[in-house]
Each structure stands twice: as C-alpha cells, then as structure tokens.
Image (cartoon, grey):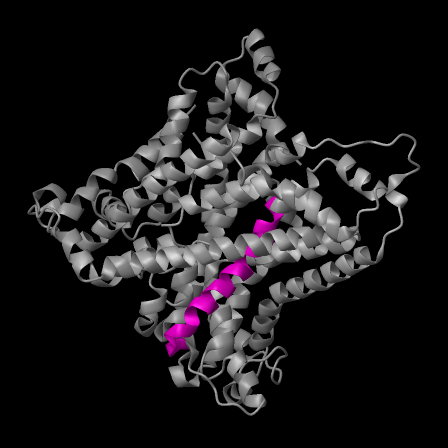
C-alpha cells in the first residue's frame, strides 16, 4: 500500500540527491553530472570570497527572524482578542475573512502589490498626490522593501497562524477561568496569569521549530513582490530567489547547486539542533 | 477539535481551589477592565478583518474602472468611473483564459483524486500497528523534509534526465503529495479505531479491501481537509509551471497565466492577439486587474463553503504529526 508513495519520493526526492555532486564540479551539459571536471571546493570559495553567500544568508536569516518574532507575537495577540469576542457570528465571520489571504495564490499578492505600490497608477501614490505630495518610486527604493515584505507576510499569514494559538487557548481547562471569575479576576489578570502562562510551551515550541527552518525562505512571496528587479536585490535577495534566478535566466547550475547544498546542510544542522533543544524541554514535543 | 496535542503542560501543575456551591460562576459581574479588553478586542479584530479584505476591494474596483481615469488619478478603493472595457477585452478573445481554466481544472480534479487516494492509503498503512515497516517508511518520507537536493539538481533530473521539460506531467506529478500531508493524514487516521481493521481481518478481508470498504468511509473529514490542501496546491500552482513549462505550452496553468499577464507586457498583448490591437491601445492597468479577478474569482466564491476544513487541518498539522 505504501508502494506508490515510496516510488514518488524515490523519484522526486531521492533520485536528485546524487546531483548535488555538481557543486564540486565545473558542470557542463555535454559531459553530464559525473563527467564534468572536478574542481573541489572552488565553487564555494568563489561564493564566499564574492560576499554573495554572506549576503544571501544574512537576508534569509534576518527576514525569517523578523517573520518568526513579529509573526508569533501578532498571532498570539490576535488569538487573545479572538478569545475575548463573545458574539459567535462576529467571531465566525472575522476568522473566515482572516484566512482568505492564505487561501489565494501568491501571484495575486503580487497583483495587490502592483496595485498599491506602482509609480504611475499605484493606490498609495494616488493617495499621496491627492493630499498634495510627490509620488514615490517605491519599486526602486531598496530600503523600503524589508518593511513592505514583512507587512505582506503578516497580511498573508497572521490569520492562519493565530488559529493554532486560538486552539491552544480553547484547550485550557475551563475550571481555571471559573475559579478566576469567582476570585474576581479582571480580564487583564485572566490573560496575564492564566492564558499567557498556558500558551508559553506552545509558543516556545512553535518558535523553536520555526527557527529550525530559518534557512528556508518564502520564495513565492519574495519573487512575486520583487521578481527580477535588480535595484532591490541588496535588501531583498534570499537564497531561494537567487538560486531560481541563476537557473531560469543564467542557466548556471554549478553555483546554484553549491548554494542549494550549503542551504540544505546548514538547514539540516539547525533542525537537528532545535529538535535536540525541544527534546530537552519536553520529550513529547520532539519530532524524532 | 483534536487539540489535545496542543494542551500546554503548565496548567497541569496548577492547583485550583474549587469553592463549593457557587451559583453559576459565569454570571459574575464583569468589571471595567473586562469591558476595556472586550472593546479593544472588537476594535482590533474588526480593523484586521477590514485590512484582510481591502486589497480584494482594490482589485475589484480597479477592474471596473475607466482606464483613462486610472492613468490620470491612479487606483483607488472605489472604481474611478465605471467601465466594463477590460472584461469586454477578455471576453473578445477568451481562448487563452479558457484553455488555462481547462488545464488547471483538469489538473486539480485528477491530482486531488489520485493524490488523496495515495496519501490516504499510505497514511493508513503507516498507522497500522501490525505493519512492521511503518517506522522505517515514515522516516523515509519524513527525511525528505530534512534534507533535499536543492532546486538545481532536482530541476536537471526532472527536466533533462526524465525529459519532462515542457510536459504538464512535470507539474502534475510533483504536486501529488507532500510529506507534510502524509504526516497530517497519519495523525487523522489515528482516530479510526484499530478494532475496525481487526474486525475486517477476522472476516478474512484483505488489507486493501479493509482500507477501501471499512476505513476510507470513516475518514471523510480527514479526506476533506487533506483534499482541500491538495486542491489548493494545484489551483494556486505557478512556480513549477514557470520552471518546467515556461513558454513551451500554449495553455499555461491559470495562476502562471496570471503571473505572465502581470509581469510581462508581451503576455498581455499576445493573450489579446485576437483583437488586433497594439499594446498602447490596450487598457493595460484595468486589464491586469480584470485578469486577476477572472483567475481568482471562482476560488474566492468557493471559499466560504470550504474554509472550515482548513481549521481542522491547521490545528492538527501545525503541532505534531
């Protein structure tokens, strides 16, 4: 019964693994993966010396740190507020609407960005001009993009992410709240002394697991917001976008394989580390 | 809601003194801070809900706007003027977009059906206590999330060695399943009592028969949730298409079609080629927005009916497989 799934993973996940050898060669189509000349670690040397690897690593990690920290804080806050809402109808509708951004394709997020931000007809520039200001060339100011990308990320994922915390709040023993109500605890005290402490383990564990994935970028979001816009690379280029571009527009398989292998190894070590920490905190939560 | 996995450990140690004979504790009078917290909650949730909706309003309004007014004043929250010009353009040469719809719908229906069946079968087998290989195979599947070859070797393998460049199969096959969906299914199957399998075995039924006749009918909620994620993967697909299909196929999957309309001026023109117009004559701005509406509209309309399956998937899958 497992045969189709096993075949799938062999073909699409395990068979490409030997191809990582390309990272140590000067690959050309004619000689193939194992026929191309072996160059040792030269590809990595080049990536390190040119500063490219450092720049990509820094961007990928900084974006993820911002996504994880801001994301989790906003999600917890939203879950707390959802929990305070008494009207069932209101809660249902607002939750449904909050998931919507996660449901649509990331291409549409690119369309939304174009609608809001473009220089000639963008809604934000239209608003600036209406109030008498000068339009801003948002697509060429690299410094603005970390904020824009973070905001779009929050827009896309907050509603979805808050559900996990909301579920955790719902699973808190009701008798705690009843006891607190008898003791005359206020809403602040309820949040401060019951809900937040109860959420702490969930929070820490989700945080640790997302830290394990800190080397993986949200390619779709970055590519649809920034794409081939070279003037923004300094602040927006992450590992995934750079690898994708090397393949699509430069046919450069050696460097892209080297970057990919570096990402896989680094990421693997991080997951192992985070899992080890989780295991020390609470064995039941560890992945393996 | 199967959220027992999420239950935080901290509450376990807290002792609570329960007073006897409390008349309906829910009715304890709310003090002022309760109202403040509630007021803030309603306000912030409302604002956030509106922010989630606004971009959709922007795009919808823009698609019904007058192109000349957009060029003069830019996009706004309300339509600038009112014009159906953009939609008329799309309707005049609907070949491309209809083709894209056919490709995407075919892939979504077939992919979801086949993928779901395989995932359910695998999830069931990996959950069977009497299946000796379940741990090695689970790890075999799970390992692919820990370490991957990366994009470049994968691309070379599939495009060059398997010869799937320009073939819809390159997109279709890769989306059939993910390790995460198999893990999700596995934790769903846990809720199907083992006695079901046992009773089937006693009756002399084969494993496949037990799965098909006894287990599968009990897994409807799990199938709905997993199916929704699979279908969404196919419907929103643009990435694999950009890698493996590029411009080699006439009819691109819907979201990749939209991607091209937005990002390359030429795509807009060639898509509207039937109209014999030059690019300057096209209402490019409103046309882009109308294309977005046509490519996204149906799935948004479907959304209210399927969103509840989302929630169960998130709460089960996010915590632990």
Q: Residue at x 31, y 41 (%)?
A: B148
Q: Position of residue B35 (x, y in %)?
A: 81, 58
Q: Residue at x 41, y 39 (%)?
A: A274
| Quadrant of the drawing holding the N terminus of chain A | top left
Above-or-below relation of A137 to B120: below
Q: Residue at x 24, y 39 (%)?
A: A17
Q: Position of residue B284 (x, y in %)?
A: 45, 79
Task: Say if the magenta span includes residue B104.
Answer: no
Q: Residue at x 46, y 53 (%)?
A: B104
| Quadrant of the drawing holding the C terminus of chain A | top left
**Is residue B215 left or right of A119 when viewed as pictured?**
right
Picture quadrant of residue B154: top left
Q: Nearer the viewer, residue B69 or B14?
A: B14
**Is residue A100 left or right of B292 when viewed as pictured?**
right
The main secondary structure of the magenta stretch is helix
Q: Nearer the viewer, residue B274 or A171?
A: A171
Q: Position of residue B145 (x, y in %)?
A: 38, 39
Looking at the rendering, the stretch of residues picked out in magenta corresponds to A139-164
- Residue B259 at least partly seen: yes
- Residue A110 at least partly seen: no
Picture quadrant of residue B26: top right
Residue located farthest toward the left when viewing the structure as drawn? A37
Q: Position of residue A210 (x, y in %)?
A: 46, 46
Above-or-below relation of A194 to B272: above
């Amino acid at each position: 019964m497992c045969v189709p799934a096993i075949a799938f993973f062999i073909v699409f996940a395990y068979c490409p693994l030997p191809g990582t050898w390309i990272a140590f060669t000067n690959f050309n189509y004619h000689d193939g993966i194992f026929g191309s000349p072996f160059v040792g670690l030269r590809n990595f040397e080049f990536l390190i010396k040119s500063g490219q690897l450092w720049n990509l690593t820094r961007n990928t990690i900084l974006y993820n740190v911002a996504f994880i920290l801001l994301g989790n804080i906003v999600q917890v806050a939203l879950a707390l507020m959802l929990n305070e809402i008494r009207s069932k109808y209101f809660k249902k509708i607002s939750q449904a609407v909050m998931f919507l951004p996660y449901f649509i394709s990331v291409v549409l997020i690119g369309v939304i960005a174009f609608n809001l931000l473009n220089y000639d007809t963008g809604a934000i520039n239209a608003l600036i001009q209406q109030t008498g200001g000068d339009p801003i060339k948002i697509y060429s100011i690299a410094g603005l993009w970390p904020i824009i990308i973070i905001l779009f990320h929050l827009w896309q994922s907050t509603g979805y992410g808050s559900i996990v915390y909301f579920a955790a709040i719902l699973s808190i023993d009701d008798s705690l709240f009843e006891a607190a109500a008898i003791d005359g605890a206020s809403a602040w005290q309820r949040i401060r002394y019951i809900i937040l402490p109860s959420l702490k383990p969930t929070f820490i564990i989700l945080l640790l697991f997302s830290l394990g994935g800190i080397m993986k970028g949200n390619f779709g979001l970055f590519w649809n917001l920034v794409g081939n816009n070279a003037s923004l690379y300094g602040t927006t280029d992450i590992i995934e976008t750079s690898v994708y571009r090397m393949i699509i527009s430069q046919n450069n398989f050696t460097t892209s394989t080297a970057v990919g292998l570096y990402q896989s190894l680094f990421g693997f070590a991080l997951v192992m580390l985070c899992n080890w920490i989780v295991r020390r905190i609470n064995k039941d939560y560890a992945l393996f | 809601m199967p959220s027992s996995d999420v239950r935080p450990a901290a509450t376990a140690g807290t002792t609570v003194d329960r007073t006897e004979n409390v008349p309906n504790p829910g009715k304890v009078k709310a003090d002022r801070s309760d109202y403040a917290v509630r007021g803030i909650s309603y306000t912030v949730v409302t604002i956030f809900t509106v922010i989630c909706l606004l971009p959709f309003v922007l795009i919808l309004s823009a698609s019904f706007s007058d192109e000349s007014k957009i060029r003069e004043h830019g996009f706004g929250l309300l339509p600038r003027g009112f014009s159906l010009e953009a939609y008329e353009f799309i309707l005049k040469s609907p070949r491309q977009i209809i083709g894209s719809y056919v490709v995407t719908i075919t892939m979504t229906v077939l992919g979801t059906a086949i993928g779901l069946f395989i995932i359910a079968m695998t999830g069931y087998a990996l959950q069977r206590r009497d299946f000796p290989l379940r741990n090695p195979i689970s790890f075999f599947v799970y390992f692919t999330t820990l370490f991957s070859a990366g994009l470049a070797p994968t691309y070379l393998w599939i495009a060059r060695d398997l010869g799937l460049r320009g073939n819809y199969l390159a997109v279709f096959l890769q989306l059939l399943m993910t390790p995460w969906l198999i893990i999700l299914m596995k934790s769903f199957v846990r809720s199907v009592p083992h006695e079901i399998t046992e009773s089937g075995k006693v009756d002399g039924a084969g494993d496949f028969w037990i799965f098909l006749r006894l287990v599968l009918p009990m897994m409807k909620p799990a199938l709905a949730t997993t199916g929704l994620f699979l279908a969404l993967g196919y419907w929103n697909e643009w990435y694999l298409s950009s890698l493996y299909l590029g411009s080699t196929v006439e009819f691109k999957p819907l979201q990749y079609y939209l991607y091209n309309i937005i990002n390359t001026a030429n795509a807009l023109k060639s898509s509207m080629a039937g109209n014999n117009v030059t690019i300057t004559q096209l209402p490019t701005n409103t046309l882009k927005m109308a294309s977005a509406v046509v490519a996204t509209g149906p799935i948004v309309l479907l959304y209210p009916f399927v969103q509840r399956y989302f929630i169960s998937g998130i709460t089960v899958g996010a915590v632990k497989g």
